[in-house]
Image: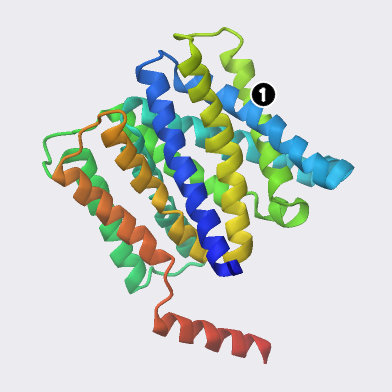
Amino acid sequence: MNDNRKGILYTIIGGICWGLCGVLGKYLFDIKGLNAQWLVSVRLLWAGVLLLLIAYIKEKNSIFQVWKNKRSGISMVVFGIFGMSFCQLSYFLAIQYSNAGTATVLQYTAPVVIMIFYALKERRLPNTKEIIVLVMVSVGTFLLATHGSLDTLIITKHALFWGIMAALTLCIYNIQPRKLLADFGSIPTVGWGMLLGGIVLGVIIKPWHVIGIWDIKTVLAISGVIVIGTMISFCSYLEGVRLIGPVKASLFACVEPLVAMILSIFVTKIPFTGVDLAGMLFILVGVGALSVKFPKERMLLKYREKTAAK
């Protein structure tokens, strides 16, 4: 198997694991009586420790380099609190108030928010493709939230609010740690971010006050959230990014909301209507189009690269 096929496979595995993670979370909320705050704090703490152990085995004491510089240390704290813990918490709260499929699709509107952010930063109007994508995602979100009626909100206000917050905080997660990732690597950065986020949430939530119904199924589901939905998913996706690049990887990672939706239907028995599916399709196609470079765009990029080289 060549690197391209390996990269595609790793990325799809990462997306499948993330989709499964959301469904396991919904199971723990509805059947076992846990809540998003408790689950996220425990998930981040354990996953952070395990990822840092993996990083230490590979890189030894170099994983502590981030704390030897004041600027990078502050950046890591910001990432851990706002990029990691808030992102995870808002996503699981959206799942708690709706379902894994809807929450995941709402979170996937984040690339459109990033697109708008960079358009404002560069002081330019969105181009034709960006406007079309914005309209598609807006229509998709409208259909998911209202089923096409201006007088009715189908999902709860809490679900819509936390779904939008999940998208906004995912933007922070994607934009803010770029220098950290470049300087210190992906696994140490994600590991420290998770550990810090888990500690901050832990101080507030006090996860040692155990809640819910505990049996072997609860333990297996929580283990799945930590190991499959965090460890395997992040490592697989990052390996996929290394092999095929972030653009192609983000396209194949779109399998996540599809997996979450399918598993929600068959595992947690969450009903989806035709309007729900249409809304999800609008969002996924719109977001996927952002990752595709059309011929004119490729020609423009090549022209800019040649001009910059001269």
Q: Is residue 259 above or below residue 49?
A: below
Residue 113 in picture, x, y percent from top left: 42, 53
Residue 104 in picture, x, y percent from top left: 38, 41
Amino acid tagged 1: Ile
Q: Is residue 49 above or below residue 63?
A: above
Q: Residues within 10 Å of mark 1 (few under 14, many from 20)?
A: many
Q: Is residue 135 above or below residue 308?
A: above
The quadrant in which the C terminus is found is bottom right
Residue 23 lies left or right of residue 155; in this view the side is right
- Quadrant in the rendering for residue 264: top left
Residue lying farthest to the bottom in this orientation: 310
- Quadrant in the rendering for residue 162: top left
Q: How is the image coloured?
A: rainbow
Q: Nearer the viewer, residue 256 or 138?
A: 256
Circle 1 is placed at which residue position? 199
Residue 253 in picture, x, y percent from top left: 46, 54
The quadrant in which the N terminus is found is bottom right
Asked whether residue 138 is in view, the answer is no
SS at circle 1: helix
Residue at 56% from the left image edge and 62% from the top image edge: 7
Residue at 45% from the left image edge and 32% from the top image edge: 90
Q: Nearer the viewer, residue 77 or 186?
A: 186
Residue 33 in picture, x, y percent from top left: 40, 13
Asked whether residue 176 is in view, the answer is yes
- Quadrant in the rendering for residue 263: top left
Residue 95 lies left or right of residue 305; in this view the side is left
Count of marks placed on residues: 1
